[in-house]
Image (cartoon, rainbow, N blue to C red):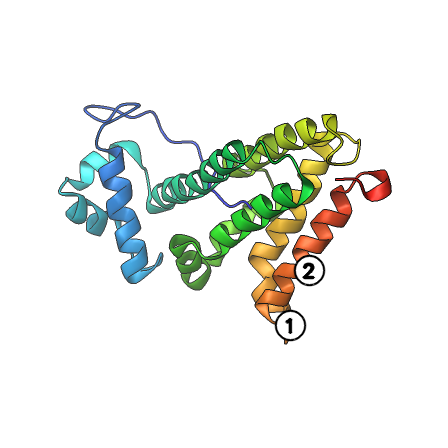
Amino acid sequence: MELDIDHRHAEPAGEVVAGWAGESTVLDAAKASLLAVGVRRTTLTEVARRAGMSRMTLYRRWPDLRSLVGDVMTREWSGIVRGAADRAAHDAGRGDLDSLVGHIVATVDAFRTNPVYLRIIETDPEMLLPYLTERRGATQQMVVDLLTDQLGAAAAHGVVRAADPQALAVMILLVVQSFVLSADALGGAVPERTRTAELRHLLRAYLAPAGGRA
């Protein structure tokens, strides 16, 4: 469910340092601008104005708009993944396959309906292309790590089939990432509710242990 920019910032200087307290303010301002006017019409000048800071302060941490948008995306996607992890931990006592699949599907829905994701898809979808064809981003790695832990624990209790949990996690990521990005474009006349039900069925069938016990 990728969906982040795995860039490398220049070393910050002056008052802008790692863990800078103003970062959240800038990311909030950038998010507001993205939602208001889209990626292509957002500028560092506009973000600085919204954040109440100078352009030079922003330039010391983000060399260009793309790197700033990348951090906005990473914060949004990471928040979704952390929320999924919290829900799964809270529901760990159920320990059944339907619950596990339900958490995956709920996370997919959270990505597909995220306002920042929708705005980027609408105004500059090319930003996502490197993380579909070239490399694994930070949020994608978070998803793989989370699923690997969950699937390993589930397999130990016979809830999912015995297999390399990381391999299962990667395959699930490939499936749900495609669903997030392409379901509307390729779904055709299939209603959204039906597509979601089929995704749930696909995941359950893929993960079910031998003999169907779960």
The front one of 25 and 94 is 94
Q: Amino acid at mark 2?
A: Glu
Residue 51's spot in the image, x, y percent? 18, 43
What percent of the width, then of the height, locates residue 200?
66, 54
Furthest-bottom residue in this view: 189
Identify the residue at image location x=62%, y=41%.
100
Name the amino acid type tagged 1.
Val
Q: Which quarter of the rendered picture does the C terminus lie within?
A: top right
When the figure is inspected, residue 202 is found, relative to residue 23, above or below; the finding is below
Judging by the rendered image, the residue that carries numbered circle 1 is 190
Residue at screen point 50% across, 56% down? 112
Q: Which element is circle 1 on?
A: loop
Horizontal and vertical percent position of residue 208: 77, 42
| Element type at mark 2 | helix
User: Is residue 179 shown left or right of residue 6?
Assistant: right
Q: Quadrant of residue 117?
A: bottom left
Q: CA distance from mark 2 to mark 1?
A: 10 Å
Instruction: Name the residue: 13% across, 43% down.
Output: 52
From the viewer's side, name the closer residue of 164 and 122: 164
Among the 4 quarters of the image, the one containing residue 36: bottom left
Residue 99 in the figure: left or right of residue 5: right
Q: Which residue is mark 2?
A: 198
Which residue ends up furthest to the front in the rendered image?
A: 94
Q: Are marks 2 and 1 in contact (CB under 8 Å)?
A: yes
Residue 94 in the image: state x and y as whole percent: 60, 36
Q: Earlier in the sequence, mark 2 or mark 1?
A: 1
Q: Residues within 10 Å of mark 2 (few under 14, many from 20)?
A: few
